[in-house]
Image: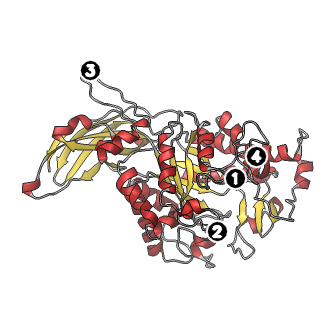
Amino acid sequence: MRRIIAACIAVLSLVTRTTANNEVTEPQLREMRGIWVASVANIDWPSEPGLSDETLMAEARTIVNKAEWMGMNAIFLQVRPASDAIYPSTEPLSMYLVGDDFERKLSFDALKFWIDIAHEKGIELHAWVNPFRVSQSKDFTCGEGHLLQTHPEWLIKYGEKTFLNPGQPEAQMYVRDIVMDIVNRYDVDGIHFDDYFYPYPVKGEVFADDESFRNYNPKGLSLDNWRRNNVTLVIRSVSDSIRSVKPWVQFGISPFGVWRNKKDDPRGSKTQAGCTNYDVLYADVLRWIDEKIVDYVIPQIYWESGNKYADFDELEQWWSKLSTSETRVFVGHAVYRINDGGKKNPGWNSKDEMPNQVRKVRNNPRSDGSVFFSYKQFKRADIFNFDSFLADSFYSLKTIQPAVNKGSAGEIEIQHVERNGGFLNWETEGDTAAIRFYVVYRTLRSEADKIGSNESIYCITDKNRIQLNTPSIRGRQRYVYRIAAVDKFRVFHPLSRRITIKE
C-alpha cells in the first residue's frame, strides 16, 4: 500500500539533484496539508473560555498530536478573532480565552507555545488574523484597551457586529502594525487572512462609510472601486512590510470560494453564487495574484461536487489555473459538512464526497494541496472514517509544503551524524539560524536506494536528534539514515552522509 501511495503522489513536484554516483541530494516532494484551528466562539481552541493554563496547553497538544497523526503539515491558528489576541499585546486577551476575567494573565505565551509544539512535530504554524472584525456579536465583551474603547472613530457598526472601516487611513495602518507586531515577535511560518474584508451583506442594513468615501478618495473612484482599492492597499502594505523584515514568512489569503460569476465577468467561474469576492466583499483576489502581492490563496470551496450554484469541480479547476510559483493555490475544504447535507445537499451524505475532493486536488497538477475547516470535525467521532482515510492512506507518507520563489538561506550542511546510546544525533554548519526543520530519512539497508523519496521520510522535526527504536535483540535489523535540513524558505539542503544502524 505504501508503494502505491508513493506512486500516486509522484505527480507532485519531485525535483532531485544527483551526484556523479546518482545519489539523491535534494528531494522536493511537496504538498500542503493544513487544518484551521478557530478560536472565535470557541469553535476549536480553547473548547470554552476561562480554562486553566494547564488545560489550555493540554488541549493545544491534543490538537497538534491529532494533526500529526493525520499527516498534516500546517496549522492555521486564529490568533486575533475580533481585534483581541490570544498572545500578550497592547490589546486585551480574547474573551474566548479568558472569559470575562480580563484582568487575568496567563503563565505562558499561548502563541509561542503553539509555535513550539507544532515545530517540534514538523508542522508549520500560520498566524490567522481577522483584519477588520472588531466585535462578533451584540453581546461581545472585551477588556481595557480594546478598539471599541480606544478608537471608536475608526469603527462602523453593521448588523450585530462592529468592523474597522477599511476606508479610514488610520485603520489601514493599524492592521499593518498588528501584523508586524506578530511577525517581529514570533517565529511564525505565515500570516493568514480569511474572507472577512468588507462584511457579508445584512438585509436592510447599509455599511455607513460615506464620510470616509468623501474624505479619502482623491482619485474620484466609484464607491465599489474605492472599496476594492482600500482592501488592496492593506494587503499590499502588509505584504511589503513582511517581506522587508522576514521574507521567508508567507502571507496568504483564504477568500470566499467564488471570485466572480462568468455571467458578470468572462474571467469568472461557471457559477451562480449570490455572493462574490469582487462584487460583495470587495476583495480583488485576481489582482493580488497578478501583482504577486500574496504568497498563497486558499479559496473556501465549501460546496459539494455537482452543486448547481457552485460546483466543487468547476471551482477547483478554476482556482487551480491561477497557481504560479509566486502564488500557490491550496483548496479549502468544508469537512464540517461531512454527513450533514440533509435533503437539500445530499452529496454531503456520501462517505465518498470528501475523499474524492482530496483526490481531485492531488490529481490536479496545478493544485498544491488541501486545508480543512476545521479541527472540530476531527475532534468528533471519525465520521465516514475520514480521519483514518487521511492517517492510514492518503497522508500516511510525510512531506513538507510547496516552496514559493522568495529566496533561500545560506549553505547548510549536516555533519557528524552518529549514534549516542538510544539517540541519533547530528551537527550542522552554515546558516543554522535559518533552519526550520530536519527531514530524517530511514530505510532498511537493502532498500537504501529509496533514501530521498518521501516514502523514506521517517520523521520531520526541529530538533537535531531523534530517539531510536529499541526492539528485541531477535528483531534487530540494519537501517540506513540520512538527514536533510529545510530552511525557512522551505528549500532543501544537501543530504548528510549515510549512517547504518542496527536496531
Q: Which mark sits nearer the N-terminus, 3 or 2?
A: 3
Whole-Å distance between the Cαs marked 1 and 4?
Answer: 17 Å
Residue 366: percent from the left, percent from the top? 53, 36
x 55%, y 78%: residue: 50
Q: Secondary structure at mark 2?
A: loop
* Secondary structure of the residue carrying numbered label 1: loop
Of 23 and 361, the residue lying toward us: 361
Q: Is residue 457 visible?
A: no
Tag 4: amino acid: Tyr
Query: Type of residue at label 1?
Result: Tyr
> Mark 4 against mark 3, which lies toward the viewer?
4
Q: Earlier in the sequence, mark 4 or mark 3?
A: 3
Contact between marks 1 and 2 (CB within 8 A): the answer is no
**Colour scheme in the image?**
secondary structure
Q: Secondary structure at mark 3?
A: loop
Q: Is residue 313 left or right of residue 208?
A: left
Q: Which mark is residue 278?
A: 4
Amino acid carrying label 3: it is: Ala
Q: Name the mark nearer the viewer: 1 or 4.
A: 1
- At label 4, counting other C-alpha atoms closer than 10 Å, the crowd grade (few under 14, some 14-19, many 20 or more) is some
Please tell me how crowded label 3 is: few (under 14), some (14-19), or many (20+) other residues with Cα within 10 Å: few
Image coords of residue 15 (percent x, y): 40, 31
Mark nearer the N terminus (1 vs 4): 4
Mark 2 — residue? 92
Disc 3/disc 2 C-alpha distance (Å):
59 Å
Residue ID for mark 1: 309
User: Dot 2: few (<14), some (14–19), or many (≥20) neighbours within 10 Å?
Assistant: many
Q: Which residue is mark 3?
A: 20
Q: Which image quadrant is residue 296 in? A: top right
